[in-house]
Amino acid sequence: MSARSLVGSGVRALTDRLPGAHARGQAPDGPVVVVGGGIAGLATAALLAREGRDVTLVEATDEVGGRAGSWSADGFRFDTGPSWYLMPEVFDHFFRLCGSSAAEELDLVRLDPGYRVYFEGQADPVDIRSDRQASQDLFESLEPGAGTALGKYLDSAGATYDLALRRFLYTNFTSYPALVRPDVLARAGSLVARLVQPLQSFVARRFTDRRIHQILGYPAVFLGSSPYLAPSIYHLMSHLDLTDGVLYPRGGFTELIAAVRRVAEAQGVRIHTGTEAVELTTTSHGGSDGGTARARVTGVRVSDRSGAERTLPAGLVVGAADLHHLETRWLPEELRTYPQSYWDSKTPGPGALLMLLGVRGELPQLAHHTLLFTDRWEEGFDAIFGDSTHIPDPASLYVCRPSATDGPDSGIAPAGHENLFVLVPIPADPGLGHGGVDGAGDATIEAAADQAIAQIADWTGIPDLAERVVVRRTIAPADLEDDLGAWRGTALGPAHTLAQSAFFRTRNVSRHVDGLYYAGASTIPGIGLPMCLISAELVLKHVRGDTGTAPVAEPGGGTVFDR
């Protein structure tokens, strides 16, 4: 996309978001029902309840958490989703909005190294420290002059991240004046250039060493994308791991979800698990939001574990599950903001082969976070996002070893054992099959898991890894589709390509149903736990009629971002 066409498309996208009645401070009165107990749903419920609304949250499964779930077996407790704690100020800001703080709710530790990288064909790994100067020294050792170049790169990343927080992440894109600020206009040229240039090209213009390309390009995967597809504005991600550093909540991300649930219930939210939303009930209504609304929310029909159904009355409903699933499951075609043809034209984030491995003995070869990068870097992403998709072999993959940080008392792993979470990015294709326990998944999935275990064993010097596995479970795209309603089985949500970022991403308020809002990774601002927390705040801003770009002020005034 050229800069000129980007501007034209951007104007159209922003015009599409100009607020109707319910986005101008006229949010419907009455009870609130939030559907989906992932972090976005829990956070939205908490913020709306603190606003004085009567809030009920329903979750179809027996536990809250959504993608940030957990699974236990034989003394191990595994996180089944997110494992990187980045953008700590976003978490702290959310807790402060609810009258608490991250320090009060979580036991956070800084990881050192932040993560470890094994490159194909190299015996010795590289440790990435949570320290800017250490990162510059490392890059200089990989490529002469790269240390100085990284300093400039991180200066740009930090400035871009700061601007994103102030102007682009905490906005619903419903006001032109709020976006056209001097600090944005001063950088308009560079922002447009970085939107149309892929991250890989941006990195390659500044560094030549392939290993550096991989270290700086891999954060695109956190965004459900590839460095060849993600706009280079996302180089801001390197500010998070190379400057700010990587944290970890002791006890795992189960503890984070428990904390968000705790503050939601403290605000008065009623949480019903094992309760599936089967239908959105509406009444016909004509055009109070400028002519596009055709119905108004009246409630949510739910079914409990016994199959008994009832209707929860609601003046406002927040769909915090997969947006494609919600619209196609709940709404007739004429009430959908995004018809199937819209989804058919969009790019999903990668699928994932997830492996939960309980391993006998210690694994010092692995850090808390370890990445394995193949020489066939571009080919690997093409296998996931290209025209002819398949599971990469070998794959660039990720291993989390939370037992490196948490001891046996945490319940992460029994004494003398290690807990491993392995993620292999694969195509978002439920046709690849289901996973299972102890090798009981579909043949394609289990064969890929065997290959990944063998790759980890070979590259990191753990020759007997497979023999030491005492607990094994695989999770695949078909599981994510069945269990979470994930569109095309994606592990993350719609990819952060240019056409699916910022004001181009799906809107978070229904065009055709008054009182229906959306939160979570499917909508703005996007993928990841911090983005899901921000999406909750964006619903709050809609309800308040707040069209500004700044985060909502915390009790007492100001925000953590001002400190």
Image (spheres, rainbow, N blue to C red):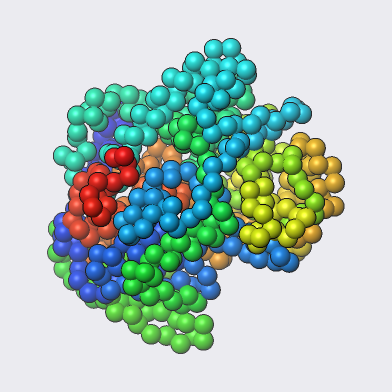
Examine the rendered structure and indicate whether residue 374 appears above or below residue 71.
above
Examine the rendered structure and indicate whether residue 295 appears above or below residue 428.
below
Examine the rendered structure and indicate whether residue 267 appears above or below residue 79.
below
Left or right? Give the position of 70 relative to 178: right
The location of residue 126, given as percent across then percent down, is: 66, 29
The location of residue 495, given as percent across then percent down, is: 47, 45
Left or right? Give the position of 472 relative to 498: right
Which residue is found at the position 67% from the left and 37% from the top? 372
Q: In the orientation shown, which residue stands out farthest toward the top?
A: 144
The location of residue 333, given as percent across then percent down, is: 34, 65
Which residue is found at the position 38% from the left and 85% from the top? 310
> Does residue 77 appear in this view?
yes
Q: The C terminus is located in which quarter? A: top left
Left or right? Give the position of 21 relative to 102: left
The location of residue 485, given as percent across then percent down, is: 50, 63
Examine the rendered structure and indicate whether residue 232 appears above or below residue 249.
above
Q: Nearer the viewer, residue 432 or 540?
A: 540
